[in-house]
Amino acid sequence: MGRVQDKIAIVTGGATGIGRATARRLAEEGALVTITDRNVEAGQAVAAELPGNAAFIAQDVRLEDDWKALMAAVTERHGRLDILVNNAGILATGPSQDLEATDLEQWRAVQAVNAEGVFLGCHHGIGAMKAGGGSIINLSSIAGLIGTPHLAAYGASKGAVRQLSKSVAVYCGRKGYGIRCNSVHPGIIRTDMGDQVMGLGGGDPQANWESRIGLVPLGEAGEAVDVANCILFLASDEARHVTGAELVVDGGMTAI
């Protein structure tokens, strides 16, 4: 029996990186997974390769109508929702997020995906889950825990995700909905977004990787599956008494 056998799951931003790895781990452990993404071709390809009866739905997490349509489609198909992984996010909309260089347009673009998208997911996810309970996992970052002077908009958005997750957890607990909500905080992880981070501000990306890995006490970058395994735990009944928590996956970076 799988750890999330027959549970109904949504993973946003499931076409690449941590989202793809998470969708795979949930499916391998028995969940019926719906992947969403703006990248239709990549999302469909991931859904086709997953074990089980996976599906893909095109979604822009910034749009409330897309959230309404997603929840309607999943509940019509499966009758309920058990797991929501709010993974979709962006790093930047320009070459730099230096505090002085970031303008209001860039700030708002990042918040719209990373903060407002997660809010909309929680808002509509609660409605779909509250009759039977479930688990909401929101992807934050170590950038939501420590200062990010060269990633101002991104860090602020991930700090918002951290705080929102705690508010959702307490709200749902006190309402008796049986919905848990937790945030996950990756550090240096080898993904396409990780490559994007290493390319910000110029310089050699490979040299930047080596420099950043030098800050990790475990001495290596994490892989997407390392984060996915932590999300799987929070999604499963093994974590039935875990809510409002921050699960940090950073090889010890924030322990220094």
Image (tube, rainbow, N blue to C red):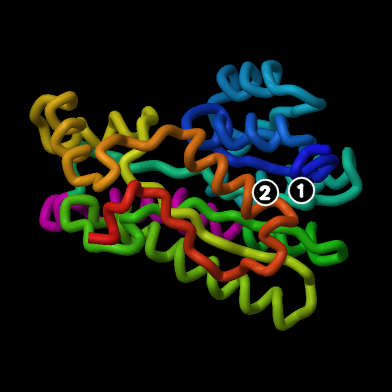
Q: Is residue 95 left or right of residue 106?
A: left
Let me know if residue 164 appears in the view. yes
Which element is circle 2 on? Answer: helix
Identify the residue at image location x=73%, y=43%: 9
Does residue 93 appear left or right of residue 100 in this picture? right
Residue 206: x and y, percent? 17, 24
Contact? badges 1 and 2 (CB < 8 Å): yes
- Label 1 residue SS: helix
Q: Nearer the viewer, residue 69 or 8?
A: 8
Residue type of the residue flagged with mark 2: Trp
Q: Which of 95 and 22 is in front in this view?
A: 22
Spatial CA distance of label 1 from label 2 is 6 Å
Say which quadrant the C terminus sits in: bottom left
Residue 34 horizontal/vertical position (percent): 72, 35
Quarter holding residue 192 = top left
* Residue in view at x 65 percent, y 78 percent: 171
- Magenta span of residues: 98-121
Give the residue displayed 28% in from the left and 61% down from the top.
255
Is residue 158 inside the magenta stretch? no
Q: How crowded is mark 1: few (under 14 residues within 10 Å), some or many (20 or more)?
A: some
Residue that carries the numbered disc 2 in the rendered image: 67
State the residue position of label 1: 71
Above or below, comparing residue 215 to residue 204 in the picture: below
